[in-house]
Image (spheres, coloured by chain):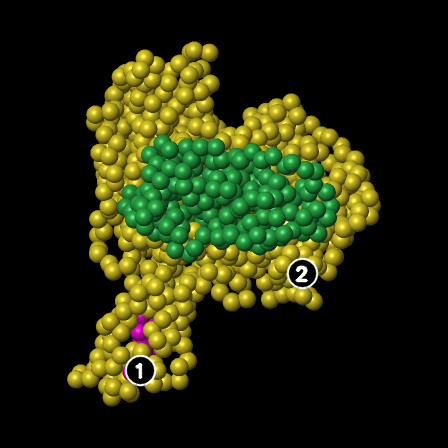
Amino acid sequence: MSASYKPRVQRQFIGGYRPRIDAIQKAQGRAPYADDIISDRAYPGLLHARVLRSPYPRARIVHLDASKAAALPGVKAVLTYQDPEVARLKPTNAGWTDAVDTVSYEGMMWRKFRDRRVLGDYAAWAGDELGVAIAAESEQIAEQALKLVEVEWEQLPFVMDPLSAMQPEAPVIHPQIAEHNVLPPDPIGGPDIFLNKGDVEQGFASADVVLEMDTSHHNPTQGALDPWCCVAQWQDDRLTIVSNSYAADQTRMHVSQMLDLPIHKVRVISKYVGGQFGRGDTGDQPFFLFTALLAKQAGRPVKFKHTRHDSFHDTRQPALYHCKVGARTDGTITALHFKSIGDIGAHADHSVFALKFAPAEIAEAALAPVPNIKMESYAVYTNHIPGCMMRGVGNSQFNFIFGRMIDGLAERLDMDPIALSSKNFGHAWGSTPDQSLMAVLEAGAQRIGWQEKRHKPGAGLLVDGTRRRGVGFSLHPGWHTEWQEERRGQVQAKITLYPDGTVTLDAPTVETGTGSNTCNVLGCAEALGFLGVRPEDITWVATVDTDAGMRDCVQTDSAVSFLQSEVLAVAAQELKQKLLALAAPVLGADVDQLTITQGQIHAPGRSIGVKELLFQGDLVPLSVMVSRKPATQRTGVPYIASFAEVEVDTATGRTQVLKLVIVNDCGTVMYASGAEAQQIGGQVMAIGEALTEEIVYDPVHGVPLNFNLIDYKMPTIADMPEIEPVLLEVWRGAGEYGACGIGEGTLTCTPRAIANAVYNAIGARVDDIPITPEKVLQALGRI
Amino acid sequence: MIKETLLNVSTEISANDRIRIRINGEWGEYEVGRDLKSETTLSTFLRERLGYTGLKISCDEGACGACTVIMDGKAILSCMLLAVEADGHDVLTIEGLPHDDPVIEAFAEQSEPGHGTALQCGYCTPGFVLSTHALLNENPNPTLDEIKEALSGNLCRCGCYSGIVMAVRHASEKIAAKGG
């Protein structure tokens, strides 16, 4: 049983344990998701679209004849790569940005890697959407029509692993971008050696101990239960898209720029989304475009929805990491060299973010005390499913080698890895030992029982003859602080106060499950404390509609939990000034003589209630909209850690997680129940990633085999161990709350914590996740 | 607990045949060919034809539990049943539960420290609520293992399983307090 956290500052609403604001609506099944809204009833004449997906890992369409499909009764629109409105679309990338900001086509982050054609004639993985899209009276007719399309394919040689793809004789997947399948240096990611601090060779020469190690991270997928879907509808020359995209403003920009429509001629609406987890990067997905073009051709609204099979659409980038570390016998790390080879799959999209951008940030945030660091990375095309953003982008892959390095070095030096960590890691703006890091490790160690349970590798007690127990941990710097959100630009929020003291809150963000909507309502009530407003007096506007003219704050970097509350704190002060200006003549006093507490405005010797004041007036609602950039003070970062206890059956190779302790220094806990839900919930993905989830290919044909929820094994309630969430407030960021986001990072450390615990249990390393029974038995020399 | 209900479809279904299904307490009569096809799944019929959108079609192959409804007191996966197979049966969707249903309330209210909430994105929640109903109908006071067994056919990708266990326990207490 977890102890409740202790807030640094006791506040009225922020930080509390309470239900989510949308909980009752969701539990009643009344929360409207895109697939619920886009029905034949709501959209008379609605058509349903399907798109051709390549059956081959690499192929080109030589000839395509859709005439039989077009002639099938019920087919209303057919779009192929030969149609001029398709052929003229610019080459693109499905990750224009990490969705922190809105970007144009020219300004997209990975402008050197525009390797996607919308409905092109070339497939780079067995599942690529290409060639032809069809809209018909029903999904079944559209699917049947697809089967009537005659396609002559040129099957091309393919390559399924990045090391082979780097060889000179390998098939070249996107020759116009990467001559030998390795992405060239680009302005955002930098050169191959993207970080070179100090002199690593000298650092290794001055070390007493030098260790080298390798890890392998596979391609788990986001697995949101709500499949992508959208409807496109034209009214004259104006296009409306309703979807479960989590980035409405960016989707509008994408559609506007790709279809060459003025921004005001595109309207994008998003409501509730049944899980996001980074899927599809920013949502700059070709299906929005071909759905819109089909709708235009048919003159009717068109719906496109992924099947479950189609939902296996992008994944975390598999990455092979090599690490060399040098240290003195006292535990001081003198040099670090990390080299990664990333399997980015068929399309570059956002992969370089994971392979270069994120590790470079970690070097600044955690490795600053290490004097000599070299980081290099090679992002390699293969004919796998594309990598893209996924919860903890890049950090999960890096943590898997980082935590391995700590555990291995500590063992070699005969040190406690906790002591080794506090000696070497901090951030560029602090001193070691870092207070947040120390607090996180101490809390985790105490809750898991580190002193009692940690033993020499493989030296634990044998349970029932074959099972051995062990404990392990991993740590990571947070990356969701206010200064790290600078690129987001203006964050917008609007408070509208009605005469009866109730409030409408426009803090646009698509609700994907993170709970930031509850954070926003609590932040609004907290900021309006002078009015005595309670959370139940506030209506949160659940629909993000670009026609409202505000940019949505996208659920990326887990930062919406506090970014909008910081804006609301400013907005509330502006609202207060407006109220005082209204009250001053009524009370016959100067504004600076007035105060407001609990909804009562006080002047010397007189007072009036805010409601009474407003009902005396014109009853026009009082609105304040504030746009504010995130604070840029370099406040450093807080730390996160996972501690794991496992039991490994040395006879069957099965690993069972007995307990996880998840520790997050939050700066300020904005909403305790939501934060704990993220800490606990993230472990489903983490345990899946560590032990059971994996996309399996037929290596001969290059075709994925398990695009379903039976063979792609996501943990169920029966697979979950006891999880203890620990919330801390040690580090402090900028602003009213000084908080940071935590949702993504809750799963970053867990696979490594489990892998280290497995080593502690059996004394044999499995550094290639998922840790399957087969790999455990191989490590033990049993098979 | 067995989630599947095996049914005997005694007669061949053909166009213009009528079927009767009691949905949320009210019998409805539907004509095959006009209201549904013989191959229409119960999930598609309930959602797309009748507008019961609380159930979700997420995998459409019996692997996720998002389309769970209760038929004759047992939780079933409505994507694994043809609508015509529900002929003569009693179906309960999330819309058929009262707004103050103790299970709904328990899922919505869960905020006991240490367990997070019982839902986040909410997409799987109606399925969990109905599976919980079916469990508590048969076993009003289940153990942790029994809860895990009964709900292991429902996936929650947000991972609120700890909160869900608490919600089931609280629902059990609420039902007991109401006198069963």
Q: Colour of chain A?
A: yellow
Q: Is residue A539 above or below residue A575?
A: above
Rendered image quadrant of residue A204: top left
Q: Is residue A89 left or right of residue A340?
A: right
- Between A307 and A329, the one nearer to me in the picture: A307
**Residue A88 location, x and y as percent?**
72, 52
- Between A35 and B142, the one nearer to me in the picture: B142
Residue highlighted by disc 1: A613
The quadrant in which the N terminus of chain A is found is top left
Rendered image quadrant of residue A736: bottom left
Query: What range is drawn magenta here?
Result: A573-583
SS of the residue under disc 1: helix
Residue at 69% in and 33% down: A55
Residue highlighted by disc 2: A44
**Residue A200 location, x and y as percent?**
38, 30
Within 10 Å of the Cα at label 2, are there few (<14), some (14-19), or many (20+) other Cα atoms?
Answer: few
The mark lying in front, picked from 1 and 2, is: 2
At label 1, the amino acid type is: Leu
**Residue A528 location, x and y as percent?**
30, 68
The question of residue A538 being in magenta is answered with no
Q: Colour of chain B?
A: green
State how far apart marks 1 and 2 are (Cα).
48 Å
Number of numbered discs:
2
Residue at 68% in and 43% down: B38
Numbered tag placed on residue B98 in the rendering? none
Q: Is residue B39 above or below residue B108?
A: above
Helix, strand or loop: magenta stretch? helix
